[in-house]
Amino acid sequence: MLALELPPSVLKAIDKIRRAFLWKGRKDVKGGHCLLAWPKVTRPVFLGGLGISDLQKLGWALKLRWLWLQKTEPEKAWSFFPIQAQHQVQSFFAMAVKIVIGNGKNTSFWTDGWLLDQSLKQTLPHLYSAVAVRARKRTVFDAITDGRWISDIRGALSVQVLIEYIHLWELLSDVELQPEVEDLHIWKFTASGLYSTKSAYEALFIGATQFDPWERIWKSWAPGKCKFFLWTAAHNRCWTADRLAKRGLNHPPKCPLCDQIEETIDHLLVSCVFTRQFCFIILQQFGLQAAAPQLADICFVDWWGGVSNMLSGQGKKGVNSIIILGAWLI
Ligand SMILES: [Zn+2]
């Protein structure tokens, strides 16, 4: 995947097998058996997934490594291989790498993010489209020497092109190349400034919502099947009466524990009168009875977060494990 791109049909076929294995442990699975959509399952754990790789994003992350090596180890023989990176990977690379310009010989004038946070191709799209195709690969050194970037402009000079031209002219007036210094490329997503596949992969999920209970679930001592249950419960994907009713399926009219209120995952795990009593008894063993759910606690994940925040270290991990086991038993 570093060099070649797997066709979408192959990725789809692999995902079909992985999805069926996860939800049913067999070769095929129907949509109804999958409690969570596959793109959510394949997110990193801190974003609510199971940390199973998203193959397309992993492929992009590995392609980014290729672009990174071409920049940072250009003297290697393989850096001249004509490996194609998709348009979105190139754009992401321009954004992910901070460039401190030296002699400008290993930085692409139009497609690297050397002057602004993004590439000039992205920030000045009208001007870029007016540049002769053969000149779009110029290095910063080549483009700036004798003002070649200006003579490369061949397309029609619309108003937008002229505005972007003047803007670039002004930006370049502050640029001075240093012939003795190599260009420096800094990867933005690691403290060391060096590329890593993990950091690249995770950066491709920027913007996704954090999954608050991930540490509580996955960094506990509870058995895997109990953690998995809590993961589905935290996403409200268990087949409680409210969700069965929404789909017009048979469901118990009231909570089977108290026979008073409609069954929802939050009712079962935190607000049912039986659950509150059950938690009180368990937490009492550790002197934490004051943390047992009260009438006002209506959201299991919020209540659990509150209890967990009162503790630290091993004690926190232990109580989180107990809460998971307790929820599993209910
Ligand atoms: Zn109840």
Image (tube, rainbow, N blue to C red):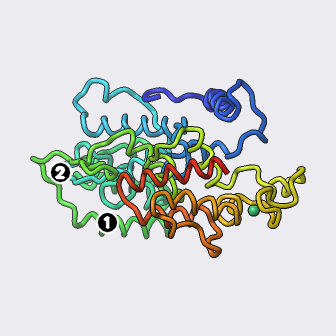
Measured Cα–Cα span from mark 1 to mark 2: 19 Å
Q: Residue furthest bottom?
A: 296
State whether residue 132 is above or below residue 83: below
Secondary structure beneath disc 2? loop
Identify which amino acid the numbered label 1 is placed on.
Trp
Disc 2: CA contacts within 10 A as few (<14), some (14-19) or many (>=20): some
* Residue 315 falls in image quadrant: bottom left
Q: Where is mark 1, residue-wise?
A: 169
State whether residue 308 is above or below residue 67: below
Frontmost residue, 274 versus 321? 274
Whole-percent x, y for residue 255 in the image:
79, 59
Which quadrant of the frame does ligand 1 lie within?
bottom right
Identify which amino acid the numbered label 2 is placed on.
Gly
Label of residue 248 in the image: none
Mark 1 vs mark 2: give the one in front.
2
Q: Where is mark 2, residue-wise?
A: 102
Kindly identify the residue that appears in the image at 88 percent across and 59 percent down.
253
Whole-percent x, y for residue 42 in the image:
57, 42
- Determine if the C-beta at disc 2 is less than 8 A from ligand 1: no
Frontmost residue, 210 versus 299? 299
State whether residue 174 is above or below residue 244: below
Left or right, 179 with reference to 148: left
**Can I make out residue 166 in this image?**
yes
Instruction: Point out the tag, 1 or 2, that comes first from the N-terminus.
Output: 2
Whole-percent x, y for residue 44 in the image:
50, 46
